Amino acid sequence: MIVFIDGPDGSGKSTLIAHLAPALVAHGRTVTHAPPLWTYLNELSAPEDFAPWVRTTPGIQIAHALLEAKARRIESLITTAGSRRAHGVVLVDRGPKTVICSALAHHKTGMPSPDDPRLRPPSTGQHRARLEQHIRHPGAVEACMSIELRLPDQPGGLDLILTRLSQREELPPSYVRYLKALVAEMATFSYTVLPLLPLDATAGVAVNTEAGLTPVLGRLAAPSDA
């Protein structure tokens, strides 16, 4: 089973994964973690390369690179589906929705685009359709779902993640602009092809871990019980 963890920066994706994985293991499930998205970005050789790349690359180029990386990661998940046990779970940090919304946000807030007709601006409708097309492939091989950590209505939600993130590092104005655009995209972007479990990003990690654990276990049990 593939479980995508979605949500904007600072919503608690990594924290949820860190708690959900041992909870699944305690219930007898085998858990693996999908490689991070940066490993599918041809432009990067290490995670610390991401910030300099964003600062020096036009937003539209970042958007296209992210969308191509998303597609490559989904193809990789399809390829490895047969090697997973019936009750195995692969946890994917930054699911397809997050990556698409991040691409759209980078396009809106990044450096101006070069005069290159080959780089067409990404559109929400176009990539919603592309996402649904991509997700149908792994969904035909094994069960998939998305757990999305959602924020309260702005400005409260944005204040929450800015506070969380500022405790770890200084937030430059360009990143805050991107983050505002990302939160807005996440709030409006929707699709229907993947079962979705929305969780409150302001809830405690124990609450969200239990809330995420129950439906994952249920979906894992359903095929063998049929």
Image (cartoon, rainbow, N blue to C red):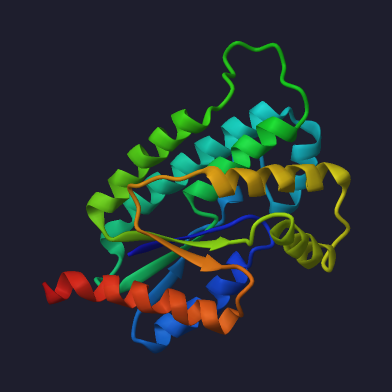
The residue lying at 23 percent from left, 76 percent from top is 221
Image quarter in which the N terminus is found: bottom left
Residue appearing at x 58%, y 43% in the figure: 101
Q: How many marks?
A: 0
Percent of width and height locating residue 37: 56, 51
Residue at the location (54% across, 41% down)? 100
The x and y percentages for residue 6 are 53, 57
In the image, farthest residue toward the bottom: 26
- Which is nearer the eye, 82 or 191? 191
Q: From what the image shows, is residue 27 above or below residue 109?
A: below
Residue reaching furthest left?
A: 226
The residue that appears at 70% across and 11% down in the rendered structure is 115
Image quarter in which the C terminus is found: bottom left
Please provide percent x and percent y for residue 94: 55, 55
Q: Quadrant of residue 59?
A: top right
- Image position of 189 (left or right of 41): left
User: Does 91 sit above or below residue 21?
Assistant: above
Placement of 68 over or under 77, stated as above or below = above
Q: Nearer the viewer, residue 196 or 115?
A: 196
Picture coordinates of residue 103, whole percent (x, y): 61, 38
Residue 187 visible in the snapshot: yes
Relative side of 176 to 103, left or right: right
Look at the image and tell me whether residue 40 can be seen. no
Q: Observer-nearest residue: 81 or 209? A: 209
Left or right, 29 with respect to 105, comes to left
Image position of 48 (left or right of 126)? right
* Above or below: residue 19 compared with residue 112: below
